[in-house]
Amino acid sequence: MTITVEMTEPIGAALGFFLTLALLSYLLGDNPLYRLALHLFIGVAVGWGLMVVMDNVITPRLAVPLQSGSDTEKLLVAVPLILFLFLILKISPKLSALGNISIAYMVGVGAGVAVGGAITGTLLPQIASTWVSLNPLRSGARWLDNLVIVVGAVTTLLYFQFWLQARPGGEPARAAPMRILAGIGQGFVTVTLGAIYGGMILSGLAVLTQQVAAVWAFASQFIP
C-alpha cells in the first residue's frame, strides 16, 4: 500500500489523537498504553537526533573531508577521529587509559565553553542591565524601576554571602544589617522563582489546551 500526500494529514491526525489519549491515560495510573507512547516518543527523538548528527556533523565534517578534502583538512579531521577511537577503547580494561585523553579533552573544552558562555552570555549582560542611573533628572520616571533592579541585584548577591560575626560564647551569625539585606534578597529570589514556575505552568496549560482542542476537532468529525 502506497501512502500518498493526501493521506498523510488524516494519518497524522489519527496518530496525534491516539498518542495524546495514550499520554493522558497516565492520569489513571501507569499503564501499557502510556508506556507505548513514551517509548515511541523517545525512539522518534533518538532517531531524529541521530539523523541530524549524521546529516549536519558526521557527513559534512568527517566523511566528506576524508574523501575529497586537502591534506590539511584530512589532518584536522583525523584528530577528533582519533579521540573518538580512544574513547571507544574505554571498553577495554587494558586500553582504557587511552580513553582518558579523550575525556580530558572533552572536559577541558566543555569547561571552557561553559565558563565563556557564562561570562559573555550571563555575567556581562547582567552587569550591563544593572548598570542604570538612579538620578531622577537623567532617568526620569524610570528611576524607581532602576532602583528596584539595583536593590534586587545587590541584595540577591548578598543573600548568597555568608559572612558570619563571631559571638563570645555563642554560635557565629550574620550581622543585623546583613540579615536584613539577605532577607530582602531572599524575597527577590522567591518572587523570581515563583514567576518562573508560574510561567512554566501557563506554558504547559497553553500546550495542553491546544492539544485537547486538536483532539476534540479530530473526534468531532466522527460525531453525528
Image (spheres, rainbow, N blue to C red):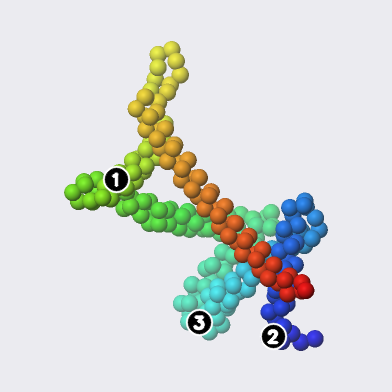
Q: Do callouts 3 and 2 mark residues in contact (Cβ within 8 Å)?
A: no
The answer to whether residue 40 is visible is: no
Q: Which residue is mark 3?
A: 69
Secondary structure, mark 1, is: helix
Question: Within 10 angstroms of label 1, few (less than 14), some, or many (20 or more) residues?
Answer: some
- The circle on residue 144 is 1
Q: Quadrant of the N terminus?
A: bottom right
Sequence order check: which comes first, mark 3 or mark 2? 2
Q: Percent position (x, y) of residue 92?
A: 69, 57
Q: Percent position (x, y) of residue 140?
A: 23, 51
Q: Quadrant of the C terminus?
A: bottom right
Of tags 3 and 1, the one toward the viewer is 1
Sequence order check: which comes first, mark 3 or mark 1? 3
Rounded to the nearest angstrom, the CA distance separating label 2 from label 1 is 59 Å
The answer to whether residue 118 is visible is: yes
Q: Which residue is mark 2?
A: 6
Q: Do callouts 2 and 1 mark residues in contact (Cβ within 8 Å)?
A: no
Q: Is residue 156 left or right of residue 109?
A: left
Q: Percent position (x, y) of residue 81?
A: 57, 69
Which residue is painted at 28% across and 50% down in the image? 142
Q: Is residue 221 left or right of residue 197?
A: right
Amino acid of disc 1: Leu
